[in-house]
Image (tube, coloured by chain):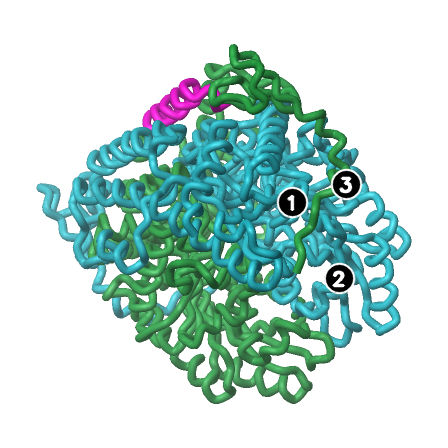
Chain colours: A cyan, B green
Amino acid sequence: VSHAVGHHKQLDWFYFFACILLSPDRQEMTPSKKSPVLVDGVVLNGPQTDVKAGEKFVEETCRLIMEEVVLKATDVNEKVCEWQPPEQLRQLLDLEMRDRGEPQDKLLKLCQEVIRFSVKTNHPRFFNQLYAGLDYYSLAGRFITEALNPSIYTYEVSPVFLLVEEAVLKKMIECIGWKEGDGIFNPGGSVSNMYAMNLARYKYCPDIKEKGLCGLPRLILFTSEECHYSMKKAASFLGIGTQNVCFVETDGRGKMIPEELEKRISEARQEGAMPFLVCATSGTTVLGAFDPLDEIADVCERHGLWLHVDASWGGSALVSRKHRELLHGIHRADSVAWNPHKMLMAGIQCCALLVKDKSDLLKKCYSAKASYLFQQDKFYDVSYDTGDKSIQCSRRPDAFKFWLTWKALGTLGLEERVNRALALSRYLVEEIKKREGFKLLMEPEYANICFWYIPPSLREMEEGPEFWEKLSLVAPAIKEKMMKKGSLMLGYQPHRGKVNFFRQVVISPQVSREDMDFLLDEIDSLGRDM
Amino acid sequence: VSHAVGHHKQLDWFYFFACILLSPDRQEMTPSKKSPVLVDGVVLNGPQTDVKAGEKFVEETCRLIMEEVVLKATDVNEKVCEWQPPEQLRQLLDLEMRDRGEPQDKLLKLCQEVIRFSVKTNHPRFFNQLYAGLDYYSLAGRFITEALNPSIYTYEVSPVFLLVEEAVLKKMIECIGWKEGDGIFNPGGSVSNMYAMNLARYKYCPDIKEKGLCGLPRLILFTSEECHYSMKKAASFLGIGTQNVCFVETDGRGKMIPEELEKRISEARQEGAMPFLVCATSGTTVLGAFDPLDEIADVCERHGLWLHVDASWGGSALVSRKHRELLHGIHRADSVAWNPHKMLMAGIQCCALLVKDKSDLLKKCYSAKASYLFQQDKFYDVSYDTGDKSIQCSRRPDAFKFWLTWKALGTLGLEERVNRALALSRYLVEEIKKREGFKLLMEPEYANICFWYIPPSLREMEEGPEFWEKLSLVAPAIKEKMMKKGSLMLGYQPHRGKVNFFRQVVISPQVSREDMDFLLDEIDSLGRDM
């Protein structure tokens, strides 16, 4: 073994090494501690940044955030959004990055504009996505981690956050009903599903890690036709191909039909494909449907298939003794994706992949053993250096914000939130049933309430092609009006042969029955003349 | 087309729908706006959260962060870390999540402990990773996005942040020297490399998206033996297999040898494999080496291969007119990964994949066209709904924090930072050369300064096996001492036949020449008696 001696090649862009001694001890060859040192035209003494100005800016931004975001978050008299079309918004904001920096007061004004024109996802009347509301404890946790800026690959740089992740994973595993398990926080439910798909594939055939898919028979996986679109993205990304995602038929409620699943598995086998994975969904994106996990687990057992449950949305029901029945049988899954950033309001992103296996499968499947990061001769127990279980190198401490909320509210507080969101959903459903011009798509199981608003002009029309054609235009038009007014935001979509309908999602404990009433009044008032 | 009528099956866990009217207008069947409404035992009127307590907690946490993190960040008299082994730290922190929540004062104390035992990655003497330091503007930007909690898939929920991402990508594309291009911010350099690998594969054979790799010849990609470990992770995750990553030989400086690359491509073809991608590295993780991009681009052109440049670490040199020569030829790449969270201090994570193609390749490769999110009948220009280019669904607005820093400092301010970091590196190199007992591994090209500390007891020993054996124990032992003292953090590793050496990384403008002197003094003082 020898050590290389540098060549100084390609270093000609470094101007000569100049120590200009301006101090009285000029004659010394090595500069004293206090003499300015100049290298490449850069003075190296002392820090360069204007610390005071920076600190002041952070402080002023915190004040701005408190005033413009936090304190206004619960005020229903504030607008949900201040709509501007892209071209106009580009004019209103000074987006351009220039050679010279901008003065602090201009920057602060710019931040104010950024807040003004951003959608207030914290607002009690933001119902547009599967996340909403403001959790104060999670937000405080996020501020802490942003300030500390850790990356959680090794215990040496991230001791607290790795222990916190371990504690949160353990608790989530308990909620699932596993005696033990493993897991990893990662950037999104889509990525969690990818993790699970790759893990199931590795379990099915560990050689794939090194040899890849080349030369193997066609792998195939099964999920329902109501699954999240990330299944397709995952299959394509992992080299499996979207055609090898078999979409199993669902019933009228959007739940996978176990008999259909079994049939499709047998068909695939007959066609020479190799089934390796079933992905059930607990809480589908549009309808909020829960697949029958127990029956699906039976099928998986019979066929020796990995069962992954995408509970990104519905997983939070596990903290409610009343509603966890929705996920009955989840303890039989091999892996579970669960996003506390959705109904438990942990802030985007907070997503865990949980794995039942305790034989270190995650690590075996994902490790690359980088010797510069995961040195084995460290002075502490390197089993805490969990970063090699990840597909990422730098990784954010997403468990921490959820942990702080959990500490603040307790499991009972989290349960109360879920119960309240589902009770509010129930209230809205009953109100929709009572009101003329509103029509439920189906009885919801969860917090997704799907319905049409039928304006008076269509109420007498027969439900034929013309009716549906006209109805399909209603939701987009009302959405445009509500956004331009800024009063409310909820989503709409066409779905599996049904024309555009609204999907109302209830999450935040700041939402009240009054907001539900407002929602229906407002839709009626915006759509009445169509 | 018909619409489903709900069955109310599996809803028996919803207790009967009860409107208990406690108000004087008891006889009304529909509750008035003010009557308490109870569903499932939950009162639905008014918001549930204790807003005042929450707001107060956020405010107090902000104060704590200012005092304990922001204001102390530049103080070299503070400890870099307050070391505790895992078992002890678990005792010191109350990690357990219980049924009932904790009082606010206890929570705040807990947050203080979290900060206390966390590594201060902002500290001027944290040199352990490829990120460090505190950028005040980026931090303010992060606070804003955490408070607003956006997800940037559609313009309707994230108008400002999508325009900001577009502006930042455009500017980064300019820095690369492309006339136009596309890109996406994503959670990490590893993920960026995966994006590029899949994109190159899609370009090579678009059918793979749907059909997968089954039945295709063996795909193979080329990178240097000094590449980041994410190449292996990516190849395994994408179903290509780690064996199909061909590691091309490097020269003594850690740079890929283009002639070797060409040879390996031909060999692979002869063996029946299908080359589709070359990944060059601009700024390798350990040595900070820059592959010769121009010569590699020539090879790629001759063989019709996609050229991806992993400039996660080195990309920031592009903002410096003096140092951008390191990446000479980068404009010839098809894709580039660049992490401003490293040398430009944007905060973890801030990582862009940039793509030269402007035929919407990213979207074609990644889109899944979810109809509930990317509706085509929206009232605005849906080309701004860029989320379908991503493998994620929810995605954080990572461009914003970098944009705010860029606005604050200007391109010239960013350049000054890079120049200063590299001048400081140069200073350290020259100091190492002067000092007895310090030995450079090689002349660095960038901000990675790799060196051995040889304690007095080994200085007279011949550089044989025993010497190297003993030297390999020195860096881990010094690392342990410095962490327990909390005075300093820098990394060490064995690397390609060389025993454990220190890797010192200079990034933050708060680092001064005095810190460089301290670093060497401290290592000497901790290792002198070994």
Element assignment for label 1: loop
> Are the residues at dot 1 and dot 3 in contact (C-beta closer than 8 Å)?
no
| Segment colored magenta | B46-69
> Residue A473 placed where, x, y %?
48, 58
The one of B206 and A267 positioned closer to us in this rendering: A267
Instruction: Characterize the magenta stretch by its predominant secondary structure.
Output: helix
Q: Chain of mark 3?
A: A
Question: Do the residues marked 2 and 1 share a common chain?
Answer: yes
Q: Would residue A154 appear left or right of B453 to someone viewing this image?
A: right
Above or below, A281 against B190 in this view is above
> Are the residues at dot 2 and dot 1 in contact (C-beta closer than 8 Å)?
no
Quadrant hosting residue A110: top left
Whichever of callouts 2 and 1 sits on the residue coming sooner in the sequence is: 2
Q: Is residue B242 visible?
A: no
Amino acid, disc 2: Leu
- Residue designated by label 3: A330
The one of A354 and B15 positioned closer to us in this rendering: B15
> Residue A530 placed where, x, y %?
43, 52
Amino acid, disc 3: Ile
> Residue B366 placed where, x, y %?
54, 66
Point 83% across, 68% down: residue:
A268
Foreground mark, 1 or 3, reads 1
Task: Find residue A288 and name its label.
Answer: 1
Mark 3–mark 2 Cα distance, whole angstroms, equals 19 Å
Element assignment for label 2: strand
Amino acid, disc 1: Gly
Mark 1–mark 3 Cα distance, whole angstroms, equals 16 Å
Quadrant hosting residue B22: top right
The one of B145 and B276 positioned closer to us in this rendering: B145
Furthest toward the front, the residue is: A460
